[in-house]
Image (cartoon, rainbow, N blue to C red):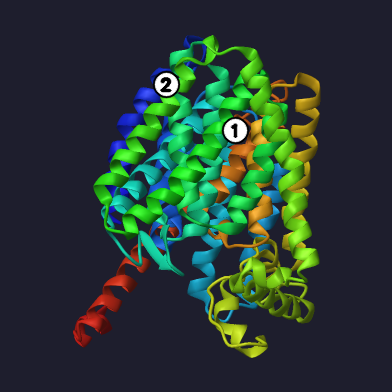
Amino acid sequence: MNWGVLTFLSGNVRGVIILRRLKKKDAKNLDWVDKAPAVAMIATIVLQGSYFPIEYMSISLVICIILLYRLSLKQDHVYINKSVMVLSLLLCSMYVISTVFVSCDKYAAATETFKVFGFMLFLAVCLTQRNKIALLGGTLIGILCVSVVGLTAYIGKWGIDSMLLEDRGLLRLQSIIQYANTTALLMGIGFFISLYFMERQKENSKKTVYAAVGYVLLISLVLTFSRSMIGIFTFLLVITVFCMRGYLMRAAVVLEFVLATAVGYLLNKLVLGGQSLMAVVLLCLSILLVVYVFLKLSSIPQLIGKTIYYIFVTLLFVVPAGIFAVVYFRKLDLLSLMGSTFASRLVYMQDGLSIILKNPIMGIGPGGWMERQFIYQTAQYFVRYVHNGFIQLALDAGVGALAVFIAIIVIFYVHIIRKYKKTHEFYYFIILMIMTLIMLHSLLDIDMSFLSVNAIIAQCIAIAVEDQSKGCSTKTGLYKRYVKPAMVIFLVITVYYIIGDISFQKAQQSFINKDFKTAERM
């Protein structure tokens, strides 16, 4: 948690710098009400991705206060997409019903439900945000903080089993998220955002800054050694490269990815070999190389860019064909090649589906999988979540909750594809890639158990459905009679649960210290 606090403070400074670099026409629309959600987004990411109750409940409290103040301003129209908000409210209601009627641990279920409310609040804040670029900036800053702190720990070999993980001869980067696969997901998201900001700039010097940021995030992604994430990211990056403008820019991004992959593997060897100084030199030299290439990009002949690009396109067909040939002719078991963890996750998912078939209407309650997995499991294991965000939703609150969430995602894809077809703006394409990256990886992991990931999903949805020509008034009786009182009640409940969680943690620590009287009093 100390790492998170230090990073959050440094993130605020970087946040002010990046926000000041926005175009003047964007900066005019920024006031503290627009800046506050961006800062909250930084906090959501750097505080361990807001995975634990005290973190995501505190963030939900802050977001609720921001939203309450924003909706209380004297403005005639605030844009809120009604269909998306009604569906998110319905999702929250299903979680509450499941918590009340079917969960075996009401307190644990209630704390899990706060994540869904956090998603809804972030969605409402993002929908009412005038400058959504500021939110993307905050997200990038938070992810960059995670990357910088993680790389520092990696080179110094600090925080083994928390920020770093030794696994089968590899030193995997987990950073302050303390989970390598979700760290990898955040790095991938950060790279796509940096790619958008880089494309947005007209001056080479500004493009170079974001290229360097993207390169650092790529190295961090490689150092997580998350096979599933690296595979999905590479696939989406290939699609992105095809959609970028200019052969030189395409070639530069391809070379950046190849260099980051090579440097990442070399850093792993050097750090494990105790050569941290060499690792620092290699990292700094590679960053300088990227900076030099992007600064000189405009002076490089187009023919070189075309050549690199077409070599890359050729390899796209040759490499997968070669892998397929080796697997096919040597009769290799593809499942064993993908690793034991993938096979284990298939078992979790199978067992999770068997529970859903027996409890389809309301599931087994939020957090119920942790207690009831032993009844249904077909192998010995213990995992907090089922490693599939969609199956987890159905387990927590039933098939209906899953259907509602899928409906929200379908609305996102319909709107974002329609906007991209109409405008052909790279902005909408990047948002499409970010959401697709999250959705694909959530099929194999616990990403949606982090409020930070859910907040990014909310951002993507808000950008997709944005239509400022259709506003709704906050002066109506509906807002005064129902919305405002409901939010005040939520604030009170959240404070109550935050106090309860703090007391629970103190009681646990007292019990560990064998101070049973204090533990009982708590």
- Asked if residue 129 lies left or right of residue 213, the reply is right
* Residue found at x 38% / y 49%: 267
Q: Position of residue 117 (x, y in %)?
A: 56, 54
Which is more toward the observer, 257 or 182? 257
Q: Which residue is mark 1?
A: 254
Q: Amino acid at mark 2?
A: Tyr
Instruction: Label 1, secondary structure: give it.
Output: helix
Query: Camera-side residue: 46 or 174?
Result: 174
Splitting the image into 4 quarters, where does residue 493 fall?
bottom left
Tell me the crowding category of disc 2: few under 14, some 14 to 19, or many 20 or more residues within 10 angstroms, Cα based.
Answer: few
Residue positioned 42% across, 17% down in the render: 21
What residue is rendered at 48% in x and 37% in y? Answer: 139
* Residue 201 against residue 392 in the figure, above or below: above
Q: Quarter holding the C terminus?
A: bottom left
Image spot of residue 393 (x, y percent): 67, 64
Q: As shown in the figure, which amino acid type bears the numbered disc 1?
A: Val
Determine which of the numbered discs, if any, sits on residue 292 in the image: 2
Determine the residue positioned at 41% across, 49% down: 266
Position of 468 relative to 192 (above/below): above
Foreground: 17 or 134? Answer: 17
**Residue 412 shows which numbered tag?**
none
Query: Looking at the image, which is closer to me, 417 or 95?
Result: 417
**Does 508 appear above or below 72?**
below
- State which quarter of the image contains the N terminus: bottom left
Q: Is residue 263 visible?
A: yes
Q: Where does the image place residue 306, in percent across and percent down from the top left?
A: 68, 21
Which of marks 1 and 2 precedes in the sequence?
1
